Image (cartoon, coloured by chain):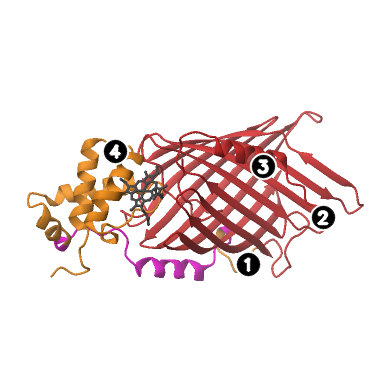
Chain colours: A red, B orange
Amino acid sequence: MKPFRFPIPLLASLLFLWVGGPLFAHERRLGFVTESRTLPKGTAELEWHSTYRIGRQNYYSAFDERIEAEFGLTDRFLMAFYLNGTWEHSLSAAGIESKSMKAPSLSVEAKWKLADSSADALGLALYGELTAKSHEVELEGKLILDKQAGPLLVALNLVAEGEFAYRPASALWETEAVLEGSLGAAWVKGAWGFGLECRSSTVIASGSLEKSTLAAGPVVSVNAPRFWLTLTPLLQIADLAKAGAAPNLTDAQRLEARLILGIPF
Amino acid sequence: MVRRVLPFGLRPSGLGLGALLLVSCAGLPRIDDDQWAWARRRDPDLTREALDGARSLYAQKCGGCHRPHAPAEYSSQAWESRYLPEMARRAKLSPEERESISRFVLGLSGKPPRAP
């Protein structure tokens, strides 16, 4: 394996968080599953999301970094803005090394809470996200259902995503659809939260099934007065495209770990 | 192609377990006669509608950054001196919103699970 190199943009994003001004962060108890909660009107928060993907047939490692600023426009509606970056490092079967840093992209998110996870029988929110890259647009829609019952949180997300990429060389548009279902539960005791998350993800590229995987893993979160952290390692446990088959390590990774850090000011 | 799983790979057993867990523990107290009676010990003029409204305002304003803590989790003294002043500022409450949320929280803090 290649030695691990700490990406400088990661440090830059940390620095940005520390000097980012008088914003509050809100805790998250799940890493991959989203909750229906929205910030109250007039409040804002800053979060840093770092996702590390590693473990394919041939050497592969990637970082997805996101910095998010979220604003509560009403008590039930929020908008958020993201700056995204991805770094990939891989070796092909033939031993050819490739290192790439994708051009940074920007995303806009809107979340609308229709029912509250504590006050109502079930929390419900609609979530939309638009990402623009050079020659590429991504649209994501999410249905969020959850329940906060005392210390227990259970959340379910159904996600549909469309990616439309223009290839100037061939003057063609490529399309990709991603369907995801994820379920998570966490038990919160004092500052600590422990739980489980699982996610199935299916990618359909230009009309044919590319991959469909199931991953699961534990989640741990901690809320300190000065910061909060959520960490989830998701391990791929099955290739759903081939019943009974071992994990798909050709197009998907074995491990996807996400760390979310929030610093209240 | 895809077997033993619902659409999106959800397993029926997982959903069943989730539903079971959900009904087995309580969240923010629902406003019933018992809760209302308790809140009127402190605030005799409080109507049930006002208490209900305060509860949903509480969920909106105090459940955005962390789960909304149940009033019974802390003493009314701790709410009054520590949490309400600090959190009213964080949640950017107007004076009326703060008044309503205080009635809900202080009214129901210290309430035992069953009224005496």
Which of B79 and B107 lies nearest the eye of the viewer? B79
In this picture, which residue range is highlighted in magenta?
Answer: B8-34
Of badges 2 and 1, the one in the foreground is 2
State the CA–CA distance, disc 2 to disc 3: 22 Å
Q: Amino acid at mark 1?
A: Arg
Which of B11 and A222 lies nearest the eye of the viewer? A222
- Place residue A140 in its image quadrant: top right
| Marks 4/2 same chain | no
Mark 4, residue position:
B93
| Marks 4/1 same chain | yes
Q: Kindly identify the residue that appears in the image at 54 percent across and 67 percent down.
A: B11
Circle number at residue A10: 3
Q: Earlier in the sequence, mark 2 or mark 3?
A: 3
Chain containing mark 2: A
Mark 2, residue position:
A59
Residue B29, horizontal then vertical, whole percent: 26, 60
Mark 1, residue position:
B3
A206 relative position to B16: left or right = right
Contact (Cβ within 8 Å) of mark 3 with mark 4: no
